[in-house]
Image: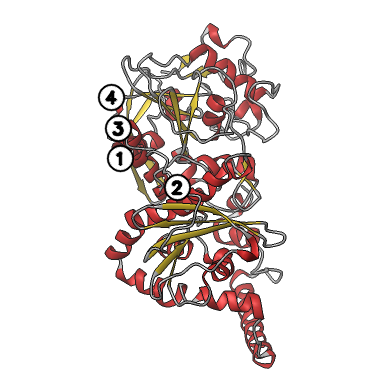
Amino acid sequence: MPLLKPSGCAGCPFEHKGKYFVPDTVLPGSEVYFLAQAPGADEEAGRLLQKRTWYQGVKHDDALMVTPQPLIGATGQLFNNRFLPLSGLSRDQISVGNVIRCRPGVSLGLRPNDVPHITTAMKLETSEAPIVKAMKHCQQQYFHPPVTTKIVVTMGRHAMFAVTGIQSEDNEYGRKAGVMESWRGYGATVEDYRSFKTVSTAQYDPLAGGRTVFFTQHIAALFQGDIDSSDTGAQGQGGKKYYHATLEDFNRLRLLIAGKWPEPLPTWSTSPPDEWPMYGAFDTEYVPETGQLLRWSLCGSDEHLYAVEHQGDSHALMAVTPGSTVLAQNWIADYGHFRSLVGSVRVNLEDMFLAHTVLWTGEPHNLNYIGSKYGTLNRYKHLIAVEGQEALYSALDAHQPMVMWKRHFLPQFREDPLSWNVYRRYRVRLIEAYHKAETTGSRVDTARLNEVKSILEERLASYQEEARNLTGDNQLNLGGRKAMLEHLYGKSHGTT
């Protein structure tokens, strides 16, 4: 039976925006506390989902009536059965809660399970936005982790913001990245779980001691339209592409609990190696506008690491053994600088981004994302903008690709030789061809290009006519995503 809001809700901006209340389930002695966003209908009613079946498009649930509590509906069932076991934990070992403990959606003109978005302009300490004030009120009144709690796992952006205040920031490509895109799979240390102070990201955080907050995506968002629509806008990118990464988050949580992640930072030399390794990972830092090389980094398969300031044109060529293998996170960016350092010696090239496009086609392929799944360190990509951290940033951009290549990429390719063949035969060959096209240009057969263009235009016109005949809509545009969704799934789908 639903629980009416207690007196602690008085004064909250959402006091009258949701009638019922879902308390956290706090286990005395628990070391891990999972904090989600807000309860759903099952949590509010106390319906513990046992089994869900579908017949002719109609949902049938078998549920047990219990005291209202977090994560007991469909999302909770997936959390309990699929994700949580990867962390080595079970439901009877953890505390669970939400940062908003009511369902204010309908009263606020939203969908029942929704709460207002967190925008990048909101600051945890000072924002007067109702959603921020409501989260702080709710946390102050009802969030009381046991003294034994060592890790709070925030599921989704609202929970992450309520505990750390971290917002979106520039990623390694210089564009604003959503907070889930930037920080999912990583963690931070806080003074207190209810301090309501924004965590500083001006240094690398080894998560050594203190109170740890670990960030993952809310499982429900994996099956919705956008993983982080509240701060990236409608990107048309379904959250399902982060399913594999979220599974890896729970694997990483197991290592964090055991003290095996993050691993210690490596040490490096600021002088170039006496001998280039036969198998190494290479990276550069340069000024994007001018292409001026600032420094380069190198990590051998033995994990000997170098981060070397570039000395300009006087810098002597490095002696690289012909036939050696050089891995880069993205050769498209680094190939020209590599050649300026080593000359024309023939080497075997490996590219982590291209490899990832083969192994995990539908996912993002930047280093921060790949590191969020496989990296041995906590997030460090924000250090690119931190004065005094430049050498560390550069060193890690060679170290982490080598570590991940050995521990994850090569084993996955050994299990999937067909993907390895696609990667080596089709992807790797793009590197030098792309560089040549960038530096010397490409010859284009304009006559053939126009011929192909004409063929494709004829096919498109034929498909357009066929689609209009099938739908009876003479104005149908195959290129219109909204119209196509409405024809395929109905107007309600196309407009949400």
Which residue is tagged 1? 86
Residue extending furthest toward the bottom: 447
Q: Earlier in the sequence, mark 1 or mark 3?
A: 1
Q: Residues within 10 Å of mark 2 (few under 14, many from 20)?
A: many
Residue 370 picture location, percent across and down: 45, 52
Of badges 4 and 1, the one in the foreground is 1
Q: How is the image coloured?
A: secondary structure
| Occupied quadrant, residue 324 | bottom left
Q: Is residue 313 left or right of residue 79?
A: right
Q: Nearer the viewer, residue 288 or 414?
A: 288
Of badges 1 and 2, the one in the foreground is 2
Q: Residues within 10 Å of mark 4 (few under 14, many from 20)?
A: few
Which residue is tagged 4? 92
Residue drawn at the location 63% of the way across and 33% of the way down: 118
Q: Secondary structure at mark 3?
A: loop
Q: Can residue 227 be spotted in the picture? A: no
Q: CA distance from mark 1 to mark 3?
A: 13 Å
Of badges 3 and 2, the one in the foreground is 2
Of badges 3 and 4, the one in the foreground is 3
Residue 248 picture location, percent across and down: 37, 45
Which residue is tagged 2? 268
Of badges 2 and 4, the one in the foreground is 2
Q: Give, as a three-letter code, the residue at label 4.
A: Asp
Q: Secondary structure at mark 4?
A: helix
Q: Earlier in the sequence, mark 4 or mark 1?
A: 1
Q: Residues within 10 Å of mark 1 (few under 14, many from 20)?
A: some
Q: Give, as a three-letter code, the residue at label 2.
A: Trp
Q: Decide: marks 3, 4 in contact (CB < 8 A)?
A: no
Q: Earlier in the sequence, mark 1 or mark 2?
A: 1
Q: Nearer the viewer, residue 381 or 109?
A: 381
